[in-house]
Amino acid sequence: MWIDNPKMITDTVKTALEATKKQDTSWIMHHVLDARELDFSPFGVIHLPQLHLFGIDISITKHVVFMWLALVILVVTFIFVARSYRKSLIPRGITNLTEVLIVFVRDEIARPTIGKGNERFLPYLLTAFFFILTCNFLGLIPYGSTATSNIAVTATLATISFIVIQVGGMMKNGVIGYFKGLIPHGIPMWLLPIMLVVELLGLFTKPFALAIRLFANMTAGHIVIMALLGLIFILHTYVVVPVSISFALFIFLLEILVALLQAYIFTMLSGLFIGMAVHQEH
């Protein structure tokens, strides 16, 4: 049907835009995405310095700040734990919790997945586990931010794991022996080119899976919580308040489990891939 009244079209567009503004949900992504300021509304906003080096933007962002905070927390914690062991070999308090987590990573992740020679890779696995765990928990505190919900952060962690995997495999089997061991023994010659491509792609899909899994899981939980709370303002009714808050609280408690689980999964898969590269005969 042809509309001859331009004013009617204008009014329709204006009404649609006003409805969109009333139900704007961009604040959900604002909470999840990285930013160039620390938002402590209604108390204020701290604008972070903008830095450029040789035309490259190296500005400090919200996720960078929280990664630095995670670093400070871990350094202070482990210095305290080390000093407490000098006074007494019987762990107490935070020292006891730290020992439990270290023993867990050593006995339940490094030894089963890597096997012989796991001691060489244990420091990296412990570093990845504690750093991811701390970043995950920092995103659950008020005004906090989850650095591991940034794909650049998870991709960097996965790249480091990729380097450790390749270097570990080459140190154990030699450069030629490592790449030779990627191809299964006894396959027909006509299948060799296909398997070579598949195995080379497999080298890169492993870190890709590590990055996407951690990023997606840490992002999804926060989006669900904010979306549930957003129903209160979108529907403009107090009836939905108990339901939204109850479900949001349930998801928040579930996020505590997810924070622990994702740190475990990333570390466990990294250890598994290292074990596969080091012990190719298995």
Image (tube, rainbow, N blue to C red):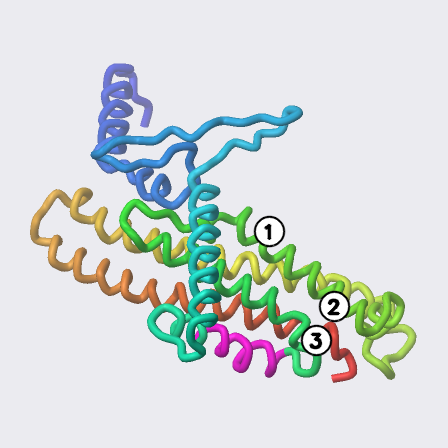
Q: Secondary structure at mark 3?
A: helix
The local secondary structure at tag 2 comes to helix
* In-image side of 230 versus 240 (left or right): right
Q: Is residue 13 above or below residue 269?
A: above
Counting residues from the start of the chain, the first of labels 2 and 1 encountered is 1
Name the image quarter holding the C terminus: bottom right
Look at label 1 and name its amino acid.
Thr
Residue 38 lies in quadrant: top left
Q: Which mark is residue 156?
A: 1
Mark 3 lies on residue: 276
Residue drawn at 30 percent across, 53 percent down: 141
Query: Is residue 102 covered in magenta?
Result: yes
**Which mark, residue 168?**
2
Dot 1 or dot 3, earlier in sequence: 1
| Relative vertical location of residue 57 with respect to residue 159 in this rendering, above or below | above
Disc 2 + disc 1, Cβ < 8 Å: no
Q: Which mark is residue 50?
A: none
Q: Residue 77 vs residue 175: left or right? A: left
Q: Which residues are magenta?
A: 100-113
